[in-house]
Amino acid sequence: MAAIYQAAYRGAALFCRSHSTYVRKMRYLNKLKEDDSLCRQAQTSGTFYLFHNLSPFLRKVGKKYLIPQLSAAGASEKSVIEAELKGSFTDLRKALFVVDEKDSTLLASAQALLRWHDSHQYCSKTGQPTQKNIAGSKRVCHASGITYYPQASPVVIILVSDGSRCLLARQPSFPEGMFTALSGFCDLGEAVEEAARREVAEEVGLEVESLRYSASQHWPFPSSCLMIACHALVRGQQLKISMNSLELEEARWFSLEEIVDGLKRGPKSAKQDNGSFLPWFPPKQAVAHQLINEWVKQQTSQPTQVQ
């Protein structure tokens, strides 16, 4: 994918500002997905986010990273675009740390859609090429008549606590020093509750006593996922971690003080003079960060969010 991609155009936003109800907005967006002529019309007045090899384009202005929204976009050399727009194409994992929350949500959704189109260019039944519609909301195999729609895989993400501590872990592929909540894909035929209990048992050898739903979030890594976030309580005499080394590099209990300190760190401030890293946690845009903040609030009974 060497071309510069047009993604996440904002033609719908022009309409939405003049129509106040949520229902009208959603119905208009649905029409854009299915009505090719309406979508073409919206594209003439919309703006675009740019991607190159699934990396979004960012421009640094002062200390902030902004996403320029352009009225036209098309195939061009990466170096030409970066020079003309005075920015750079940045890996999405890095971009999510530096852009605003409203931008991170759209960037993640746009990249997931681009990735899906790239991996569904052929029909799984006939092997024939599929064709996408103007909006990019589906692909059709005209040989078989099968219509393919983008789908998200359900993933449970669980913050385990014993009442006074919480358990965080890291995989070898994580940035140095970063810890997060446990997570795993739901198996076929498995309920969310079953998946959460199984993942905790498999990864750290603990049994969940109770489970509480928190929130959900789309997450583009490793592919399009629906993250279902839960708090899990484990109790009993056996709270010693029995880590699955095939899944994790490290897993340990954190005290409230350690969590509060870790929330104040970023990747740069976590590195020590000797080259080692103090623990730090996912960015605010990630639902794992929300789970950790909720646990801190529960422990401190303070309504304000830790910054």
Image (cartoon, grey):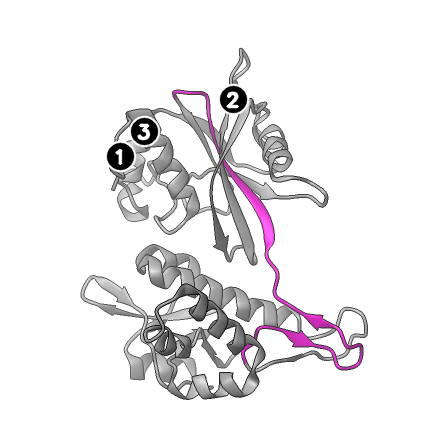
Which residue in the structure is indicated by mark 1?
Answer: 303
Asked which quadrant contains residue 188, the reply is: top right
Other-residue count near label 3 (Cα within 10 Å), few / some / many at <14 / 14–19 / ≥20: some
Other-residue count near label 1 (Cα within 10 Å), few / some / many at <14 / 14–19 / ≥20: few
Q: Quadrant of the C terminus?
A: top left
Going by the numbered disc 2, the residue's amino acid type is Val
Q: Residue 240: tell me if it is visible.
A: yes
Q: Is residue 111 above or below residue 244?
A: below
Stretch of the chain drawn in magenta: 135-164
Going by the numbered disc 3, the residue's amino acid type is Glu
Which residue in the structure is indicated by mark 2?
Answer: 234
Where residue 255 appears, as percent x and y from the top left, is 35, 24
Q: Residue 172: tell me if it is visible.
A: no
Where residue 283 appears, as percent x and y from the top left, is 36, 48
Extreme residue toward the left, this view: 62
- Comparing 187 with 41, the one in front is 41
Q: How far apart are marks 1 and 3 (CA)?
A: 19 Å
Q: Can residue 153 be found in the magenta stretch?
A: yes
Which residue in the structure is indicated by mark 3?
Answer: 258
Q: How far apart are marks 2 and 1 (CA)?
A: 25 Å
Q: Distance between the residues labelled 3 and 2?
A: 20 Å
Q: In this view, does 45 lie above or below 159?
A: below
Asked which quadrant contains residue 16, the reply is: bottom left
